[in-house]
Image (tube, rainbow, N blue to C red):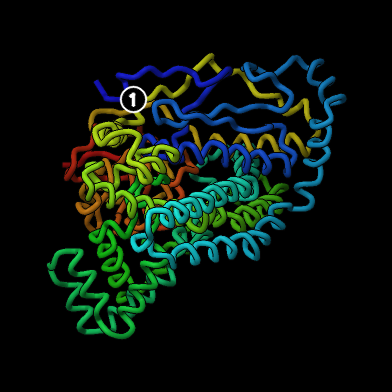
Amino acid sequence: MSIATERTFAPPGPGSWFLDPTHFTRPVTRFHAEIFVEELRRGFGESLRRYGSLLERLDWAFVNGFCYYHPQPLGAPPDATDHPPREVWERLAADHPEIRTRLATSATVFERKLWREDLRRWDEEVRPGLQRERRELQQVEPALLDTGSLLAYLDRCREHQRRAGYLHHLFNMPALLPMGDLLAHCQEWTGRTTGEILAPLAGSSPDPLADREELAELAAAVASDARASELLASSARPQELLAALGAVAGRTSTALAGYLETSGWRPVNGEDVGDPCVAELPDVVLAAIRSAVSSSTRPQADAPADQRADAAADLRDAVPAPHRSRFDELLAEARLVSRLRDERGSCADLPAIGLTRRAILAAGRRLAEQGRIHAPAHLAEAGYAELRALVRTGSGPDAAELAARAHYRDHARYADAPPTLGPPPGDPLPPEWLPPAAARLERALGAVVFAMFSNPASRTEGRTVHGLGASPGVYEGPARVISGVPEFDRIRPGDVLVTDATTTAFNIVLPLLGAIVTDRGGALSHAAIVAREFAIPGVVGCTDATAVIPDGAWVRVDGRAGEAAVVR
């Protein structure tokens, strides 16, 4: 029996609730849950209103640390599981002020290409503002602060994390709507799979972790410095080797500092203050540097660009001739905003979460030295009020309780959490009841939400697992079954990553991989997107790949067929 199945899973409110398979790889901390729900609901709610969606919001709640969501249509009671009768809907559309406003708004969204305005605001105002805030916070060394100043600094980091989370979800609609619009139209025109429709988007988000320039500069510096190259090839302990690279005078030390400043305090396998950051895993940092150096010293092929062009041409050929000019426009708009999906994490949530964790660890080290907790990272298991009390007075959950919370999060599995809670969901409002622009918007939103959150049923046959073909191509190599961050040091160049799911923070190890296979995730899950960006075969949503594929087995991954088979 799993540690998660020992607990009761009850609906956190009226209506139907769905397990979120996208944002997290394991149960979250209380500290993060207190921030995530409020800021996602506020930011996404405002984004839906700006675009005139008839979805008022997504309600979110954590049950035993697992994230569940409940769609709340505008004008519907909280316990509704189906759309109203048509006559009731028509009265609502005529009399409900907010519904009337949103229908009028949706009529202008596609004509204005509203997402372009939002992308421009992101580029010119929001992202630079977040980067300024991050740099200011990062200049403070929390280990040097007294207790009162450290708590004040933690408050600043937490508020920055709240703001970053809010802004991430405020830009949900511009990041996702054009992709959903492409999906909905191409599914109707061609009957192609979601993976085939999204394949031409590869390459439109070329810097998913927002550190490409820094890593390229570091790779070039190491490659041009004989001493640095010698160190990188050595078998010294990772922490000692990083320190030695940092001591190499000139370009290498400067580039390493710049890279760690950009990427060091980002969580590696999750989006939570309870997840380790890059700077805490020197072996992962070295693997990224070695991979970048290797890539920078060999000629780059044009195959990925050719594959993208071929995928776009193939999809366009499948579109009926009268619709091809519309297809070209839809694809161009989806490509334009595609990078925003990753940038909302890499430039907002992830660095903000990392800075908060840095402050928590500084306080945790003091408590660990005093014997109040077992490990500095265990302080991240406390809620915000608990954490402040522990740091200020020592009162609150004891060391054993915090260790138990960490143990639960380390061992509870998403596979053991029920996929739904509450009554079965009903059907959404029929699009034909809506004005054309509103129907188009709701179809697009529905298509993209399905692509993000859906997970296919298990179709395992012997030692072959089946899922969604997320990125085309065939690759054979050794399987590396990874259950969490402590195992990242086992990943070697050319491995096939087999894991439960990935998040944006996983990007640092992706350049090492030959292919990706996951238990969870849809065609717009993180694993699917980055597999396309890195031009490696990917199969997502296999349900039980981590149980079927043995670690070290030789596997063949077919990203077009959506299967991974143990060869030997």
Which residue sits at x=18%, y=75%? 231
Tell me if 230 is positioned left or right of 465 in this view. left
**In the structure shown, which secondary structural element does the residue marked by tag 1 occupy?**
helix
Q: Is residue 531 visible?
A: no
Q: Quadrant of the N terminus?
A: top left
Pinpoint residue 156: horizontal percent, then vertical percent: 50, 54
Q: Quadrant of residue 335?
A: bottom right
Which residue sits at x=38%, y=61%? 145
Up/down of 7 relative to 262, above or below: above
Tell me if 325 is positioned left or right of 456 in this view. right
Tell me if 221 is positioned left or right of 374 in this view. right
Q: Which residue is mark 1?
A: 416
Q: Residue furthest left?
A: 235
Up/down of 108 relative to 8, above or below: below
Tell me if 425 is positioned left or right of 55 in this view. left
Pinpoint residue 551: horizontal percent, then vertical percent: 18, 42
Which residue sits at x=66%, y=51%? 330
Up/down of 45 relative to 331, above or below: above
Pinpoint residue 134: horizontal percent, then vertical percent: 50, 62
